Amino acid sequence: MPVTTLPASRSEAATPRQHHRRYLMCRPEHFTVSYRINPWMEPARPTDTALALRQWQALYDTYLALGHEVELIDAVPGLPDMVYTANGGFTLDGVAYGARFRFPERAAEADHFNTWFTGHGFDLVVPQEVNEGEGDFLLAGDLILAGTGFRSTGDSHREVAEVFGREVVSLTLVRPHFYHLDTALTILDPVVAEGGTATVAYLPEAFDDASLGVLADLFPDAIRVGAEDGAVFGLNSASDGRNVLVSPRATGFAAQLAERGYNPVTVDLSELLLGGGGIKCCTLELRG
Ligand code: ARG
């Protein structure tokens, strides 16, 4: 990793520092594409479950090699999308706000995740409103960034604000291929230096104009990612504050990360992209 000198304009930005993470993942034992609830999914196209398992294993192994903890939830036959654990809920301060899926095909996953949360020491809040967990809720410092437009409703943004007593910033997604917030925005470091803001990267084309204004105000230093990197799910990345796990096809984004002093670590989940998910989708952060 070459030593990177921060440009003068960013001299106050702290050098990226790694934070320990605890994640929940689900082995894609039953992975396939048997229905279509996002534009990436084509049920007629064959999937290779063995390949999905090998690619998923590489992600799991990478987290462990970086020193993180990974918990597992059992895969359930007939629920092929359960591998995308980010949608299973949103956790903060030992509280798990459960999911309520938009489409009936995934509805049954919610109870399995809820059972996991209560069995692992989380206080469970069963939601009234439709929301798809960390797919649409991302912690940025004290703020919760919340996506809407395709899956989680605006009412769930109000609900999550009440549950956690945090300020929630609503962002509207407008491109069907980027239907969850975590497909269009990555939190690079949620820890905020005194007087600063969390560091994020995002795909401008995925948001409406009002949301772009909000993002520009909140995160003037954000990395704006190009369309080509967005199209290979480059934004569906997981960062520990220093190491950023990113698709090997998002070469432009990886270069932008390296320029800022982050360490891009490539993991290829091409088979899981057939279901419309990538690295972040397969990763739920557990904040006890
Ligand atoms: N097939 C899944 C769905 O459409 C993919 C979910 C991806 N998850 C995510 N956090 N973006 O619901």
Image (cartoon, rainbow, N blue to C red):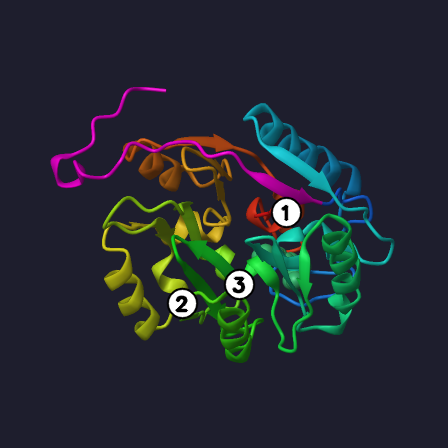
Q: Which of 123 and 193 is in front in this view?
A: 123
Residue displayed at 18% across by 39% down: 12
Query: Given contact means CB atoms under 8 Å apart, are the residues at marks 1 and 3 in contact?
Result: no
Would residue 202 be found to the left or right of residue 5 on screen?
Answer: right
Check disc 3 and give the amino acid type.
Answer: Asp
The magenta stretch is: 1-25
Secondary structure of the magenta portion, mostly?
Answer: loop
Disc number placed over residue 167 in the picture, else none: 2
Using the image, tell me which numbered label, if any, was put on residue 282: 1
Quarter of the picture containing the N terminus is top left
| Residue 112 visible in the displayed image | yes
Residue 67: image location, x then y, percent: 56, 26
Element type where label 3 sits in the image: loop
Res 41 visible: no
Asked which quadrant contains residue 152, the reply is bottom right
Mark 1–mark 3 distance (CA, rounded to whole Å): 14 Å
Residue 136, label in figure: 3
In the picture, the disc for residue 42 is none
Q: What element carries label 1?
A: helix
Q: In this view, does 269 lie above or below 39?
A: above
Indicate which disc, 2 or 3, sits on the residue closer to the N terminus: 3
State yes or no: Cβ of the residue under disc 1 lies below 8 Å from any atom of ligand 1. no
Q: Do the residues labelled 1 and 2 touch (CB within 8 Å)?
A: no
**Up-down: is 105 above or below 232?**
below
Q: Is residue 29 left or right of residue 97?
A: right
The residue positioned farthest toward the top in the image shown: 2
Kind of residue indicated by mark 2: Glu
